[in-house]
Amino acid sequence: MSRPPNGTPSPRAAARIAAEPPSYPTGTRTIPGPRVRGVRRLVPLYSRLDALHRSLRYPALSSALAAFALAGSGVLIIRLVQRQTGTTGLLVGLGLALLPLPFVLGAVAWLNQAARVPLRHALFCLAWGACAATTFALLANGWASDFLVAHSARGETLGAEFATPLIEELSKGAAILLLLLPIRRRRRCPTGHDCTLLARQPSAPVPRPRSGGPRGLPRIRRHLRPLPYLRPAVPRPAGSRPRARSSPRTLAAGLVLGAITACGFAFTENALYLGRAFTDDQQSRLDSIGLGEPPTLRDFDSTVHTFVLRALLSPFAHPLFTALTGLGVAVTLTTGRRWLARAAAPAGLVMAIGLHGVWNAAAGLGTDGFLLIYGLVMVPAFATLVCFAVWAHARRSRQLPASPR
């Protein structure tokens, strides 16, 4: 009488089966929900993703992956430059572009005494600017120029004054954002076990302390990697006025990160332009020799003109542009005013793009127009940035004896 003739269980047996808990393989947590089979199919995929995620926790392996990617982009940019300049032009361009680099890096190293940016971060930014940023900018500028020329009568002017500054400043500013990515953080289960899904189980929200200002910090800061030189100021005791300004160290760190990235970018760009000018001059010299004219030093006027313009008159042009982006990011990450945190980084990027566009437009205004823009825009902007860097360095130097290093 326990089982009917048709094979269905009796009501008592059905109640006993329903009361027993389901059996699952040991060693894994149970996932709530009806689709247990679908969740089990995700376990092999999760194991591979978890292995990759665990590997990023080791600094040596993550540094090796970054070095491999930068080396690949470096080989690619050398190949791209060599196609436009030739082997001889590439070697000459690299040699001439190397001459102003120690002076610019020396100025950045002096400012880094106040910022104390680690050497590995500085080398990453320098390599990013010289390899990855130039590779992306060279390819993207070519595509944007072709598109604008094909669809507009003023495509070349639009590309030089609008598209090129936008692409180059975004590619250089990406180095600072990559340093802030939390690639070494690993999601952990709230109960301390290994979950079979990447997503956490829903839990009660944990209240976060409000610091850095009366209205709290921007939400984006919670998801970024906390760098020691880009941290908000320590909150003051209760009852005192909260500090809303960024510290001199954080401002100097933003300038250093942006400037050193632009140093690498300017080095590769100078090598490209100088190598291209030398190749053109060499071809013109060969043509003049074929026509029976004697060779003179004036055959390399284009190379000398490019070297004077890029290496002597404006070695700090690219560092000036990208330093504005780094300064905006530093203010966004460290200020206590919410409106300033939201507006600082976009404002810094817009200022960098605008100043870069004005500099590119000055090249098409002739000698008088170029000198006018150079004296009225570039020199005051550079002087202002230098004064700001000296102020931050002096303030930080006065604070060092009173603060732990």
Image (cartoon, helix red, strand yellow):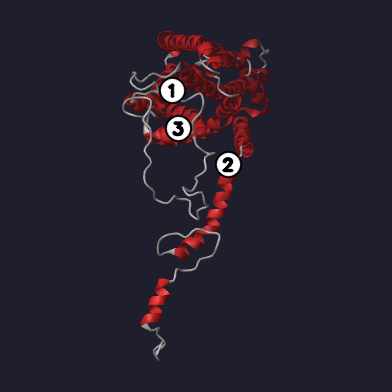
Numbered circle sitting on residue 56: 2
Q: Nearer the viewer, mark 2 or mark 3?
A: 2
Reply above or below: 315 against 211.
Answer: above
**Picture coordinates of residue 119 (x, y %)?**
60, 24
Label 2: how many Cα within 10 Å (few below 14, some 14–19, many 20+): some
Disc 1/disc 2 C-alpha distance (Å): 30 Å
**Picture coordinates of residue 236 (x, y %)?**
39, 20
Residue receiving disc 3: 145
Disc 1/disc 3 C-alpha distance (Å): 48 Å
Reply above or below: 273 against 16.
Answer: above
Looking at this view, is 28 or 13 the one in front?
A: 13
Q: Which amino acid, by three-letter code, is at mark 3?
A: Ser
Residue receiving disc 1: 234
Circle 3: element type? helix
Looking at this view, is 17 or 363 the one in front?
A: 17
**Picture coordinates of residue 252 (x, y %)?**
49, 17
Circle 2: element type? loop
Looking at the image, which residue is at 61% across and 19% down?
97
Q: Which amino acid, by three-letter code, is at mark 1?
A: Val
Q: Nearer the viewer, mark 1 or mark 3?
A: 1
Circle 1: element type? loop
Looking at this view, is 332 or 97 the one in front?
A: 332
Reply above or below: 275 against 13.
Answer: above
